[in-house]
Image (cartoon, rainbow, N blue to C red):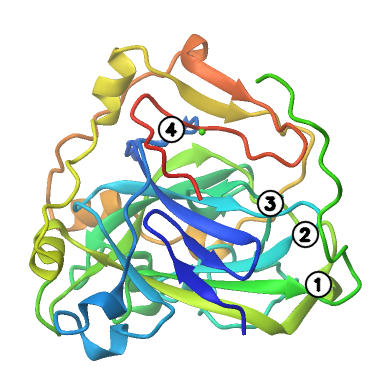
Amino acid sequence: MLDVTIDKYAIRVGPRFAVSFQRTLRIPDDGRTYPLPPGLGAFPVLPTADFASRVPASWCAADSGFIAMYQREALWLGFRGAAWKPNAVKIAVGRINVVSGAPFDEVLRDRPQDYLVVPEQPWLDGINTAHGAIRQFVAMPLGAGYTVEAALSGSEQFGGIQIVVFEPKAGRFPESPPPQPPPGPEKMSAPGARTMGLGAGGAMRQKIYPDPYGLHTWDPQDYGSVNVHILNSDQYRQVTGKPPPLPPIDAATYTRHGLPWFDLYDEERPDVAPAPRLRDARTVAQRDAELDRIAAGVESFEVTETQIKKLRRKGAERPDRAGPREEAAHP
């Protein structure tokens, strides 16, 4: 099994892979497809074992951590990996696979592909619902029918985010990195309380890339897994004794101030087919309509082309989506 290390702003699985949980703007679910919102700093990640007396006993494994989010706040997952020796990565929310829509397990499949390859995939903002587009991850409380888990399983037992990272088979890639050229000039509450899960928000331009190496590349026995729980602001204060981070700026205000959105030059690249189960999953806005609720702070707005910063990959580097409040928190 691969070692899991929970740092202040990231989780590392094995010797090369890391994931951070980036605060971001929540986009409206209004029928439009928006560009990539910025990263507004990484959520702090804390090991649940450090708070064993204040969280459910089932959370206290070495591979378990937690973050704090406000209700209806959005996030994206930022990945770090090594191009010379990549990893296959399965992601689930509430134990629903975000690529295929199937129930989560620790088996890699390619028909359809139910995993990502990192660092080929630099980030993931939501569930796989359309060619070239996803629906944004939005934090919602369990028990009210808002989450992807509720939409596809009919219950809300798990919440949180589940990640499994697989190593390649021996001999497929080098065992050490290639020589690097010299750098040139150039970023809770008591056990049993309801925590948070992730629902489906607005649509965003983003591709999930096919595996360029093939399923046979990955070692099904050499993997590490981690479970990330999501606490609301009150639960975080109760568990840690500290205040949660301040809520982020809303997307409409951010845009009115002329701040940047992002797009990635990847028109020539194929993408994984959308998952029918995820495409048809009820969104947060649709659940609001069912309950006759009006949510504030998600009004529609226009993002002009002059506001969209085009990103290019530089070799194996991850494109930078840092926003004006990006913290020094990259894994």
Q: Which residue is mark 4?
A: 37
Q: Position of residue 155 (x, y in %)?
A: 30, 80
Q: In the visual, does 61 lie left or right of 19?
A: left
Q: Is residue 156 visible?
A: no
Amino acid at the residue labelled 3: Pro
Which numbered marker is on residue 11?
Answer: none
Q: SS for tag 1?
A: helix
Along the polypeptide, which appears first: circle 1 or circle 3? 3
Amino acid at the residue labelled 1: Leu
Marks 4/1: CA–CA distance: 32 Å
Q: Which residue is mark 3?
A: 119
Q: Residue shown at 91%/73% (left/top)?
A: 171
Q: Quadrant of residue 37?
A: top left
Q: SS for tag 2?
A: loop
User: CB atoms at circles 2 and 3 under 8 Å apart?
Assistant: no
Q: Which one is in front, 135 or 258? A: 258
Which numbered marker is on residue 215?
Answer: 1
Marks 2/1: CA–CA distance: 8 Å
Q: Residue shown at 52%/27% (left/top)?
A: 262
Rendered view: 83 above or below 5: above
User: CB atoms at circles 2 and 1 under 8 Å apart?
Assistant: yes
Marks 4/2: CA–CA distance: 25 Å
